[in-house]
Amino acid sequence: MHKDEQSRKLERLRRHLEDGTTDLSPHSLKVPASHYTSEAQNAVEIELMFKQRPLLVALTPHIPNQGDYLTHEAIDISLLLVRDREDKARAYINACRHRGARLVEGKGHKASFSCPFHAWNWGLDGKIIARPNSHEGFAAADDCFDRLVELPCYEIAGLIFVLLEGEDIESKVHALMGASLLDIENYNISETKYIDSRTTELACNYKFFLDGFAETYHIASLHKETISPFYYSNSTLVDQLGEVVHLVSPRKTIDKEFEKTQSEQGAILPYCTTEYLLAPNVLLTHQVDHIQFWTAYPVDGANRCRIELNVFWPNPMDDEAERKAKLNVDLVWQVTTEEDFPQSVAIHRNLISGALPHLIFGQNEPALIYYHQNIATAIGSDQLIPLATANDSD
Ligand code: FES
Ligand SMILES: [Fe+2]
């Protein structure tokens, strides 16, 4: 986030904290249970939002050097992300063109990819290098079997996007991200170091994961014993940048900035959790001094999801700094898995029971409202009902 924008946001936060207020949405929102539980809606979301929109699948420091690779499960499609010999990030389907075996798992560094099944060897550019011991048995194969299946891939501001269906990824990324790209560029994500990842599957719709991060209203109650003492939990800034919902939530340490003289003030990043919520499934967070990259995908329909956390820290790092960063990953994962995720699963059970027809998002939860309205607009749903306040209807 640029320094001028930080100053403007600091002033907005000061007013909210002095007045005991928070950013509000113009209306509250009534949301039917089917928004989370409907298999038909989930299928439309997968087609229109996961397949036809660029997905943010990785950050530049996942694969900083030529030959670095990362696998990423996008819905049920296994992607292989590679930095090629021209420093370009490329995305392939993680499947050998012979009989479809997965080429690699996880993350690492290779000069080429040798298929575990019959040892066909593939270059970083996706072209076949060798088919050992094949006795010319593939001489009649079409040219398409000489190349891995490649998908459109676009890297900008330290973010790596992939488009599962269609073309023109570059203009689609800019249309989706809008001004948030400039904002995110200021974090110098490319210069950070990958620290660690965690992943889990939950028995709930993937959108509940984003819901748990899109308001700080719950921090004082749900996280009373853990992170609540560190936050001003009910004064949050919420803005829309393109399709991205942007949240800034202050920690109590922000008082240090307010104590400075007016001319010295201006920084908010060291005192805030700054989030970029990209529908349908990504949360990018600047947390005081480091970056968290979260993804959520539906698994086998509407009622199950896979969550992944990746953490990055500014360079340079010595061993002690890296040890502390890894401890921090454990702490973040512990709070979310022990406190947030059980709520998501419990809510989903209540909704699929059929006993609870609707939920409501209050005006003090504007990021939830913007996020879900973005989804509804993208899939052409009219199921989310804005509720006007009494003043509006006068
Ligand atoms: S499936 Fe890869 S070499 Fe046979
Ligand atoms: Fe939480």
Image: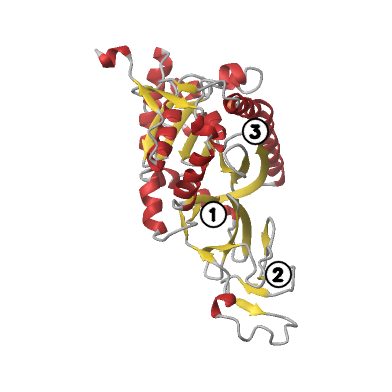
Q: Residues within 10 Å of mark 1 (few under 14, many from 20)?
A: many
Q: Is residue 119 left or right of residue 175?
A: right
Give the mark, 2 or 3, whose residue is nearer the N terminus.
2
Residue type (three-letter) at the residue carrying disc 3: Val
- The secondary structure type at the circle numbered 3 is helix
Picture disc at residue 332: 3
**Alpha carbon of mark 3 to alpha carbon of mark 1: how far?**
22 Å
Is residue 104 shown above or below 207?
below
Picture disc at residue 214: none
Dividing the picture into quadrants, the one containing residue 84 is: bottom right
Q: Does residue 265 appear anywhere in the picture?
A: no
Dividing the picture into quadrants, the one containing residue 303 is: top right
Q: Residue at x 63, y 57 (%)?
A: 70
User: Do the residues under discs 3 and 1 have CB atoms within 8 angstroms?
Assistant: no
Q: Position of residue 190 (x, y in %)?
A: 52, 52
Between label 2 and label 3, give the one nearer the viewer.
2
Give the mark, 1 or 2, whose residue is nearer the N terminus.
1
Q: Position of residue 207 (x, y in %)?
A: 53, 35
Q: Does residue 27 appear anywhere in the picture?
A: yes
Near-viewer residue (46 or 331) = 46
Q: Residue at x 67, y 70 (%)?
A: 99
Give the mark, 3 or 1, whose residue is nearer the N terminus.
1
Q: Position of residue 391 (x, y in %)?
A: 28, 13
Residue type (three-letter) at the residue carrying disc 2: Cys
Q: What is the quadrant of the N terminus in the image?
A: top left
Residue type (three-letter) at the residue carrying disc 1: Thr
Picture disc at residue 60: 1
- The secondary structure type at the circle numbered 2 is loop
Q: Residue at x 60, y 45 (%)?
A: 312
Q: Say whether mark 2 is within 8 Å of ligand 1.
A: yes
**Disc 2 marks which residue?**
115
- The secondary structure type at the circle numbered 1 is helix
